[in-house]
Amino acid sequence: MSNEKKNWEESRQDCRNKGADLVIINSKEEQEFIGKQLGSSKAWIGLSDGDEEGKWKWVDDTPLTTEFWAKGEPNNVDEEDCAEILSLNGNFWNDHKCSHKEQWICEKRVSQ
């Protein structure tokens, strides 16, 4: 997890520069693990609906199947196309404006 803050695209580029990408969360266990690491912070994850409004997909182009949205989210207030994880009031996702600066979490896939 980063210590600095960048917008979603800059965050993703930082991950790519390290041979990784923004994290893809596809299990409750992974969601809970990341929430514990965050403490009371929030961070960008690799989820966006920037290509087509309402069609959320991961950075590897897989569709969203396991969801941990906060109540009432995603709500697309003010054209929010990128997802962040918050562990402030539980451990949930929120859609946010991609230009907002947040910490981020990279994930490196292991080759098989």
Image (cartoon, grey):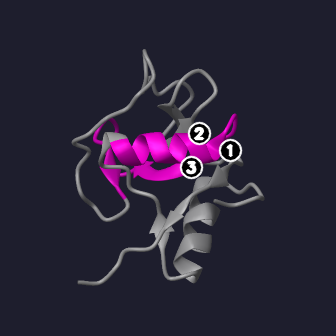
Q: From the viewer's perspective, is 26 left or right of 17?
A: left
The quadrant of the rendering that contains the N terminus is: bottom right
Find out whether residue 36 is within the magenta segment. Answer: yes
The residue depicted at 71 percent of the width and 48 percent of the height is 101
Q: Is residue 16 visible?
A: yes
Q: Nearer the viewer, residue 22 or 101?
A: 22
The quadrant of the rendering that contains the C terminus is: bottom left
- Looking at the rendering, the stretch of residues picked out in magenta corresponds to 29-58
Q: Are marks 1 and 2 in contact (CB under 8 Å)?
A: yes
Q: Which label is found at residue 100?
A: 1
Q: Which label is found at residue 44?
A: 3
Horizontal and vertical percent position of residue 88: 64, 27
Residue with the mark numbered 2: 97
Tell me the amino acid under the disc marked 2: Lys
Tell me which numbered mark, 3 or 2, is placed earlier along the sequence: 3
Find out whether residue 22 is within the magenta segment. Answer: no
Q: Where on the picture, by quarter, is residue 14?
A: bottom right
96 up-or-down from 4: above or below: above
Q: Where on the picture, by quarter, is residue 62?
A: bottom left
Q: From the viewer's perspective, is 38 left or right of 29?
A: right
The residue depicted at 48 percent of the width and 75 percent of the height is 20
Horizontal and vertical percent position of residue 50: 41, 48
Q: Are marks 3 and 1 in contact (CB under 8 Å)?
A: no
Q: Nearer the viewer, mark 3 or mark 1?
A: 3
The residue depicted at 58 percent of the width and 81 percent of the height is 17
Tell me the amino acid under the disc marked 1: His
Horizontal and vertical percent position of residue 89: 59, 21
Tell me the amino acid under the disc marked 3: Trp
